[in-house]
Amino acid sequence: MIGDLLRRLTATDPEPLPDEDARLALTALLVRLAKSDGYYDAEEIARIDRIVATRYGLNPVEAAKQRAEAESLESEAPDTVRFTRAIKDAVPYEERAAVIEALWDVVLADGVRDAEEDALLRLVAPMLGVTDQDSALARQRVESRQV
């Protein structure tokens, strides 16, 4: 399954992903973001599981399984651009703010706004068609929920 998804993500002219694959790509992007500072801790893993469970209506075991599959995909995938393209193609513009909020939620999971995670998110947001201003508003919404 992961090999097939990787082939589709790396195709020269990829087609929009089916919903299940788009979910996996988004989860892999969350994992990539969490790992971008070189520190992938239990708090970030738990936050990814919670985001995935809430977003897709999964129970904790199903969410953990999806995250584990996403970790495999993330470790084999060549670059962030293809994840982002798959998500952009699969998620309507109106819902991408929630994607950015989920990404900020992972960045802020450990209570530190790390430079590497911040830089990756600043790269990803415009690739998703989300402005810096909308990304900053999404970050503020996430920060206000964490207080």
Image (cartoon, rainbow, N blue to C red):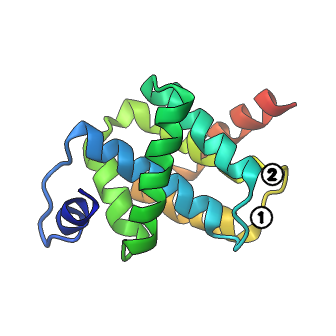
Q: Residue furthest front?
A: 61
Question: Is residue 67 visible from the viewing direction of this image?
Answer: yes
Image position of 103 (left or right of 20): right
Q: Residue at x 54, y 63 (%)?
A: 32
Give above or below for 43 relative to 39: above
Q: Amino acid at mark 1?
A: Asp
The nearer-to-camera label among 1 and 2 is 2
Does dot 1 land on a helix, a strand or a loop? loop
The quarter in which the C terminus is drawn is top right
Depth check: give the residue in front, 115 or 65: 65
State the mark number for residue 114: 1
Question: Is residue 108 visible from the viewing direction of this image?
Answer: no
Q: Position of residue 17 (x, y in %)?
A: 20, 48
Image position of 75 (left or right of 92): right
State the mark number for residue 28: none
| Count of residue discs | 2
Depth check: give the residue in front, 127 or 62: 62
Q: Position of residue 10 (x, y in %)?
A: 22, 71
Q: Residue furthest bottom?
A: 78
Circle 2 sits on which residue? 110
Q: Residue at x 24, y 64 (%)?
A: 9
The quarter in which the N terminus is drawn is bottom left
| Separation of marks 1 and 2 at Cα, in angstroms | 9 Å
Dot 1 and dot 2 residues touching (CB under 8 Å): yes
Q: Position of residue 50 (x, y in %)?
A: 61, 34
Image position of 47 (left or right of 57): right
